[in-house]
Image: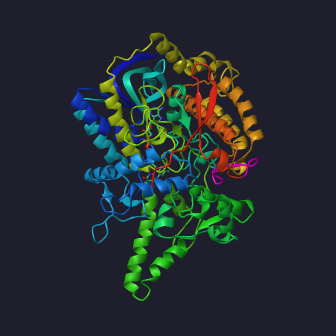
Amino acid sequence: MANFETVEVSTDLLIVGGGFTACGAATEAAYWAKKNGLKVTVVDKAALDRSGAIAMGLSAINQYVGLREGDNTCEEYVNYVRQDLMGISREDLVYNIARHVDSSVHLFEKWGLKIWLDEDGKYVHEGRWQLMINGESYKILIAEAAKNAINDAGGEIIERVFICEPLMDGNKCVGAIGFSTREEKIYVFKAKATITAMGGAVHVFRPRSAGEGFGRSWYPPFNTGSSAFFTIKAGAEMTCQEVRFIPVRFKDAYGPVGAWFLLFKSRAISATGGEYMAVRKDELQNWAPYGLVKPIPANLRNYLGMLDVEAGLGPLYMETDEAIAKIADEFKDDPKAFKKKMKELDSEAWEDFLDMTISQAHLWAALNVKPDEKHSEIAACEPYFIGSHSGASGAWVSGPEDLDTPYKWGYANMTTVDGLFAAGDASGASSHKFSSGSHAEGRIAGMAAIKYVVDNNNEPNVDAAQVEALSKKITAPIKLYDAHCNETTQPEVNPNYIKPDQFMHRLQKIMDEYAGGVSSAFKTSKSLLERAMELFVYLKEDSAKIGAANLHELMRGWENMHRMYQGEAHVRTMLFRDETRWPGYYYRADTPTMDNDNWLCFANCRMDPATEEWEMMKRDIWTLPE
Ligand SMILES: Cc1cc2nc3c(=O)[nH]c(=O)nc-3n(C[C@H](O)[C@H](O)[C@H](O)COP(=O)(O)OP(=O)(O)OC[C@H]3O[C@@H](n4cnc5c(N)ncnc54)[C@H](O)[C@@H]3O)c2cc1C
């Protein structure tokens, strides 16, 4: 029988999550904490060195404005994000990140990251905003800097603790509670301020990968909606919960396409329809003004390819052979230079995968793919929640103090809950921050949270009864399983509990079939979403009956609890937004056009933590003055 002991950790600032945002927050907060004699504690469900979306490494830094070089302005970055998100973005947040992101990149370089340089010593760009890197060890370097900063400031890093819920004192967050994934221990963190940075969510929707491939997805399987759950459960206002991200990637191993499109200038075609971006250009008129301005928003690029697939013109292909041939053509009159260039392109193509999606290199090798000889299949992935990339879902946070906006209630990146900050994937409506921008936003939140603690240096009032009740709730799946697992010959089949993976499949089936997943061709409607909500009632009821055989399954159970709330917020907000704004992410078949008169606004929501009743609201868009 499980016997959990309770470990109590008191701190001034608690950072939950250990990814890029948390590392940025830790690095910056530690500096200010040391000056003010405060303690910073970081808690991660995994190990900082290789946790989060960048665990495997990356081949490009996707946000670099180039202020020092005079390449771009912050306003231009804001325009780019507004355009890509079809008008829906918190321009104050995007601007704030843009003006700080370059300094994060310069720090990365100082800490040892190899950013590609050209013969003149300038950064090699993949595209206008992207820099090429040798990024296999990207996460290790950034984590090392965070660890050094925390150690130097006398803080604490606790790994392999899964955070389940926030601890609340009315509308103030006073810490968090979770459990060790390795030992029978409940962790109670008491904090004067908390930053949530637990990434986005995958496997809310049924993935394309099935059977032995299950678990393979574009978004890393270990981020499961904990940021969204944490802020929703704290009673924070959430934004852009309807905005999912569907990347188009190399099919089945989800390998990156950025280098192919941006660096190698490759074309994408359908098997019999030609280059869908050219053939279906007229469709873009329907999504004006965004469809008519370059770069065409990612969702619209998806959409044109999806139209080809729907018309039976698939599969879609990346023309790798054609792109390589075009680049090498310059050297055709010099056989030696030609051979050298081909070798260079070949190694760049493979390194792109080896840096960040090794399984794509495996798949190419397994299928005898030579990118210079034959094109490769691409496809739209299943939907994900990633507010830092081309999605936007997250908490509604206070904007920077120096901009005159309607979005300020004190401290930068504080949610509508007192003392609770959010950044990176956890903060919403500020897409396209990627790795570097998430780090920069983490730094912004880290500094603001320390300022909050300095101004509000009161001991957190943690209610013992709340801790007791949550401890019981956290371990309930283990107790339920223990009590009943011997009552059936197959412990997986038992009327008293549902196993975490069975629960997950049920959630995924609802999301896939009713909320616009892969099998419904990313289409949904009011009636389908209402049916999803009916099924969610039963799903939620059964979430109290998740049974876990061990600590690992306990984590799986809690991951699915978190996914379920992310799913519910998504369904509710798609239902609320009576239009189709991002047709290549989801398509409301009953309201198939964009309605700028009524919906050029944020669709926000808030769940009352006591009653679990949801309130939906619109919020105005503030546009950065030219
Ligand atoms: C496939 C892919 C490719 C990408 N490519 C690029 C690229 O080429 N260039 C680029 O600049 N950016 C890229 N990005 C974006 C970049 O990875 C993210 O912007 C960045 O990782 C966001 O940082 P984060 O800290 O918010 O989330 P993450 O870095 O994902 O960190 C989340 C952290 O939360 C922890 N966590 C999760 N749940 C819990 C819990 N319950 N309790 C405790 N801890 C928890 C995790 O262990 C992890 O430490 C890519 C992202 C993906 C998914």
Residue 428 percent coordinates (x, y):
51, 41
Question: At 60% across and 31% down in the image, what residue appears?
Answer: 565
Residue 393 screen position, x and y as percent: 54, 41
Tell me: 71 left or right of 429.
left
88 displayed left or right of 313? left
Q: Who's the residue at 40% across and 14% down the image?
A: 461
Q: Is 183 located above or below residue 501 in the figure? A: above
Above or below residue 313? Residue 174 is: above
Residue 24 picture location, percent across and down: 35, 41
Residue 477 vertical position relative to residue 434 in the rendered view, above or below: above
The answer to if 585 sits in the magenta stretch is yes
Assign the magenta stretch its main secondary structure: loop
Q: Nearer the viewer, residue 234 or 152?
A: 234
Quadrant holding ligand 1?
top left
In the image, which residues are magenta?
581-592
Quarter location, residue 29? top left
Q: Name which quarter of the figure residue 38 lies in.
A: top left
